[in-house]
Amino acid sequence: MPDLTIETFWLCETARSWERTVEGSRGDRYRVCYGPTPSGPYQYGYFCECTGYRYRRTCSHIERAKPDHCNWNQFIDGGEPDAAGDCPRCGGPLTAERVAV
């Protein structure tokens, strides 16, 4: 069996956990979140606290919030952190992730 190599890559902290408040069509405000799903800690997805999301697992609030979500992942998107060591897309903080390949 071949040896595994440990690779380190960077990801924006919004790739782990993120939330926004979105105004609904009737003026109500809903919290849209991105993070681990109930099916396990390694699967991530969007959630909304509106009634529509509870029934359909999707809603317009999520679609309105998605463009504001950076979610940069060096392993998937490529690129390097900027000169200050921040996210190249949003300028936010980064976190290191290690994976065996």
Image: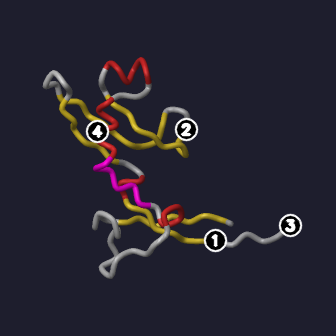
Determine which quarter of the picture holds residue 80.
bottom left
Assess disc 2: are there few (<14), some (14-19) or many (≥20) residues with their C-alpha within 10 Å of its C-alpha.
few
Q: Is residue 33 above or below residue 25?
A: below
What is the CA distance from the residue labelled 3 to the residue labelled 1?
Answer: 16 Å
Residue designated by label 4 = 64
Q: Position of residue 65 (x, y in %)?
A: 29, 42
Residue designated by label 1 = 6
Q: Residue furthest right?
A: 1
Dominant secondary structure, magenta: loop
At x 60% / y 71%, what residue is drawn?
A: 7
- Nearest to the eye among marks 2 and 4: give it: 4
Residue designated by label 3 = 1
Indicate the secondary structure of the residue bearing disc 2.
strand
Q: Is residue 5 left or right of residue 87?
A: right
Determine which quarter of the picture holds residue 89.
bottom left
7 in the magenta segment: no
Marks 3 and 1 close (CB-CB < 8 Å): no
- Nearest to the eye among marks 4 and 1: give it: 4
Indicate the secondary structure of the residue bearing disc 3.
loop
Q: Which residues are magenta?
A: 67-72
Residue designated by label 2 = 40
At x 31% / y 27%, what residue is drawn?
A: 49
